[in-house]
Image: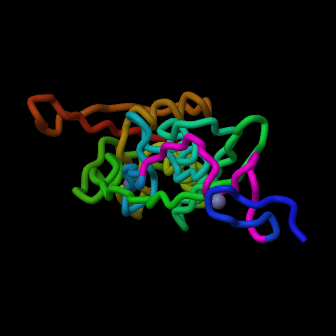
Amino acid sequence: MHDLVCPRCGATNEKTQFMGPFCIDCAPFKLECPKEFSIELCPKCGKMRIARDWIKFDAPIIEKLLRRKCKGNIEKMEYDPYSGKATFFINKDNNLMQVSRDVEFKPIKNLCPNCSRKSSGYFEAIIQLRGRPERIAKYEKLLTTALKEKTFIAKTEQKKEGKDLYVGDSKQVVALFRELGLKVVISRTLHGLRQGKRLYRTTFLLRL
Ligand SMILES: [Zn+2]
Ligand SMILES: [Zn+2]
């Protein structure tokens, strides 16, 4: 037995969800959303670009950005970039109905600044760890973990007097040493020019 018959297509509420007098396929509602959604993604580290920043891939942020591009009486939206399925909860005369749309996720592959610097062999800072081997090992681990979050380690070199870490961004090194309250000896050497700017390499000597 069924109570509702759609006046447009004849579907019944046994098989289809109804919204007011119409079935969900015939009910008039407003929903505009793009067919595809693009964002810059770094193919090396997987980070995504949001305005000027490169941040860890984050599906909820992608959902929020897509939501801004959709129009209609949308109460809620869920988007899964992996399947490209967007689910909308539309409010129509206080009835909530669920509508799905395909929004293809089309990442634009672009190297982030860190990865492009890294791949070109670029670095700004050398951290020289000197002292007892077990102290060096401890601090190498600590510094590497912290710096990988903000910049990158281009390479490490074992020397007979200790260890050298080559780091992408010297500002991040300064900030980290300040944060950790470590005393270092800093020296700068002019390394060359890049796009008309003087390039310095900074050496941070840390005695442990
Ligand atoms: Zn219908
Ligand atoms: Zn990257």
- Residues 125 and 92: in front is 92
Residue 146: image x %, image y %? 56, 46
Range of the magenta residues?
15-34
Q: Residue 124: image x %, image y %?
A: 30, 42
Q: Is residue 190 left or right of residue 74?
A: left
- The number of callouts visible is 0
User: Does 193 sit left or right of 58 as displayed?
Assistant: left
Is residue 19 in view?
A: yes
Query: Which quadrant, please, contains the C terminus?
Result: top right
Name the foreground residue: 131 vs 49.
49
Q: Residue furthest right?
A: 1
Residue 136 pos. (x, y %): 56, 55
Residue at 76% over, 61% down: 5
The reply to whether the magenta stretch includes residue 73 is no
- For the question of whether residue 153 can be seen, the reply is no
For the stretch drawn in magenta, the main secondary structure is: loop
Look at 57% across and 51% down and name the residue there.
Answer: 58
